[in-house]
């Protein structure tokens, strides 16, 4: 079962006050229903179909007609089709081009409304995948902008994208997607999402640290290799170095894989004469400068 399905199943089993159930049902019908001489709703999720049936029965004492069909072509999932002939319920549900104010009159009603939108049009990538993504697939631009604005009342940073003749409201930030799941009370989904997100973030951080450490090792090796080549040039030309530079050269030859920091500590301990990393760096700069003069000779 997909992560989206599990989150929707959880939302379907949440008990709400009737006033919030009206907002949730309003969103379900507004976002998905085909309204002709009757109201037709289609979903691939059996729990969502059962939730719609239960709400219509509880709020309006209506038993919608249910038809189950298998999808065509590549989509072999079952489609649950609910039909309601009594269109008078649209007024009670505040359904217009945009919902009436009493449907979204306070935060609790807005949260219920967004839960309804998610049940019918929402999908979330499993956080185990390579990217975080939550979207709502809607067929009207003004309605898509309205839903985006509702989401952004909770600082979810949603955006609207046109996709052929439809409109996608989407959120891509992992923390914001987790906040949305909290918003609609899908707490089991939140726990799963956060566990995977934290694991991935920790893994990414570890990889970055490992990459950084490897880059540092490569840099140390490259630096030491250049210093040894400079020393080899000087030795081949029988050039006499100053005592301090000769000391640096000898220790580099003795410890070819040590970093400058490690080498400065070794010299300080073995000679009982403290030298800093910076001081050692300047000695090797001098050695390099001398070697450069003789490389082409």
Image: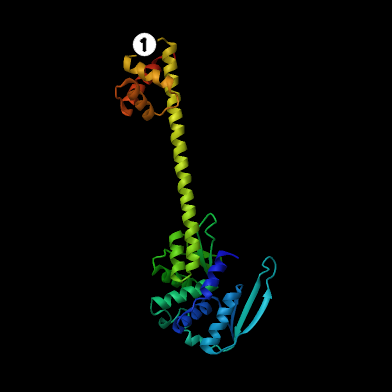
Q: Residue at x 43, y 13 (%)?
A: 235
Horizontal side, residue 220 vs residue 267: left or right: right
Q: Position of residue 102 (x, y in %)?
A: 41, 83
139 or 260: nearer the eye? 260
Depicted 204 relative to depicted 158: above or below: above
Q: Position of residue 76 (x, y in %)?
A: 68, 68
Secondary structure at numbered mark 1: loop
Rendered-image quadrant of the C terminus: top left
Q: Position of residue 296 (x, y in %)?
A: 44, 15
184 or 254: nearer the eye? 254
Q: Position of residue 95 (x, y in %)?
A: 48, 82
Q: Residue at x 61, y 81 (%)?
A: 82
Q: Residue at x 45, y 33 (%)?
A: 217
Q: Is residue 297 visible?
A: no
Q: Which residue is mark 1?
A: 240
> In which image quadrant can residue 125 be found?
bottom right
Q: Is residue 48 visible?
A: yes
Query: How many dots with numbers?
Result: 1
Q: Residue furthest left?
A: 273
69 or 215: nearer the eye? 215
Rendered-image quadrant of the N terminus: bottom right
> In which image quadrant can residue 66 be found?
bottom right
Depicted 91 relative to depicted 223: above or below: below
């Amino acid at each position: 079962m997909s992560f989206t399905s599990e989150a929707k199943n959880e939302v379907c089993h949440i008990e709400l006050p009737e006033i919030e159930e009206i907002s949730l049902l309003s969103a379900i019908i507004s976002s998905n229903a085909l309204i002709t001489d009757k109201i037709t709703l289609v979903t691939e999720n059996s729990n969502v179909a059962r939730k719609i049936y239960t709400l219509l029965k509880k709020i309006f004492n209506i038993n919608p007609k249910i038809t189950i069909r298998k999808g065509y072509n590549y989509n072999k999932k079952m489609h649950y089709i609910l039909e309601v002939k009594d269109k008078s319920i649209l007024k009670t549900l505040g359904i217009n081009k945009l919902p009436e104010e009493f449907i979204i009159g306070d935060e609790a009603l807005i949260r219920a409304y967004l839960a309804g939108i998610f049940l019918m049009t929402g999908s979330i990538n499993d956080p185990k995948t390579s990217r975080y993504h939550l979207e709502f697939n809607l067929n009207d631009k003004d309605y898509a902008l309205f839903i985006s604005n509702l989401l952004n009342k909770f600082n979810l940073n949603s955006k609207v994208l046109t996709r052929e003749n439809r409109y996608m409201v989407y959120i891509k930030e992992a923390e914001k997607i987790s906040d949305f799941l909290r918003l609609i009370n899908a707490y089991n989904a939140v726990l799963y999402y956060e566990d995977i997100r934290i694991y991935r973030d920790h893994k990414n951080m570890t990889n970055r640290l490992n990459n950084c450490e490897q880059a540092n090792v490569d840099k140390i090796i490259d630096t030491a290799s250049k210093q040894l080549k400079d020393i080899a040039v000087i030795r081949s030309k029988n050039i006499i170095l100053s005592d301090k530079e000769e000391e640096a050269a000898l220790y580099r030859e003795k410890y070819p894989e040590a970093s400058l920091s490690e080498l400065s500590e070794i010299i300080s301990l073995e000679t009982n004469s403290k030298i800093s990393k910076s001081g050692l760096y300047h000695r090797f700069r001098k050695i390099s400068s001398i070697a450069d003069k003789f490389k082409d000779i």
